Amino acid sequence: MNTNNLKAIRNKKGVTQKEAADALGISPNTYKNYEQGMREPNNDMLCKIADYFKVTTDYLLGRERQVNPMDLLIAQSDLTPEAQEELYIALPPEAQALVLQVMRLMKENHRRRQAEKPPTIWIKRHQNKAAAGFGYDLSVGDEWHDVEVTDTPEAREADFAVEIDGDSMEPDYHDGDLALIKLDPDVEVGKVGLFIVGSMGYIKERGKKCLISHNPDYPNIEGEARCIGLVIGTAEKV
């Protein structure tokens, strides 16, 4: 092993012999012997040392003139900004040009992703869920928080949103959907709305004398129901 290269890469990484030994799972004395040339690591340990310092085994054996500068930058990514700047300045001009090229590509990719991101808006969402199956208590008036959703005409028209729990309205509405509600105390028959039965909230289709489940595995809900609003669509959470 090239002891000078081993010492150099350890110093570049900024760790002590003991810290390197602990990371490699060997005793400090064994690692010290590696650096002093008193002992040679076996092939498995040589690979382990190369992985730890993020260099090649050829570098540790002295077959490379210097460590790959990009590998060194990656290995030192936890340094302070000042130390990273010093490391960058120490790179040869061709390596500096490569770093700048990578940074420009990353910046352009970030700008493109931001441009492709659909616009969003914030709407009120009830903390409790409305059932497509079993009811939830929606009677508490202050259980609200804001949620960011994709900006659509339906999201702009909605007065608030409520999450659907259950599958009794499939295939039209699914468990986890965020239903957009437009306040309406008298949703017409055949339309899907948010209804209160007692203090429990349900997403159901309004029938003439009941609340209808679209999934045939679930019964309809008979009896009086108070209408809160019309379901005008679902929102995509951001």
Image (cartoon, rainbow, N blue to C red):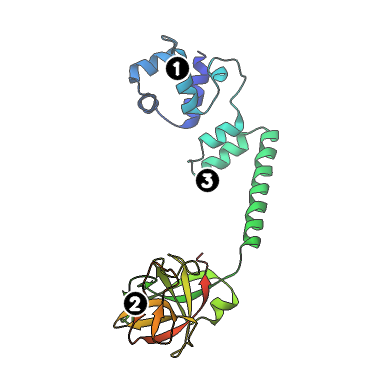
Per the image, the residue denoted by label 3 is: 81
Q: Nearer the viewer, residue 169 or 235?
A: 169
Between 87 and 122, which is closer to the camera in this rendering?
Answer: 122
Along the polypeptide, which appears first: circle 3 or circle 1? 1
Q: Residues within 10 Å of mark 3 (few under 14, many from 20)?
A: few
Q: Nearer the viewer, mark 1 or mark 2?
A: 2
Of all residues shown, which one is farthest toward the left? 198
Q: Residue at x 57, y 15 (%)?
A: 62
SS state under label 2: loop
Residue ID for mark 2: 143
Residue 136 image position (x, y, % from top left): 32, 74
Q: Is residue 79 above or below residue 237?
A: above
Q: Position of residue 84 (x, y in %)?
A: 54, 41
At horizontal 45% and vertical 84% (from top left) the residue drawn is 229
Depth check, mark 2 against mark 3: the one in front is 2
Q: Position of residue 177 (x, y in %)?
A: 46, 67
Name the amino acid, label 1: Asp
Q: Are marks 2 and 3 in contact (CB under 8 Å)?
A: no
Distance from Cα at disc 1 to Cα at disc 2:
59 Å
Q: Residue at x 48, y 41 (%)?
A: 78
Residue 44 badge: 1
Instruction: State the residue at coordinates (43%, 90%).
Output: 185
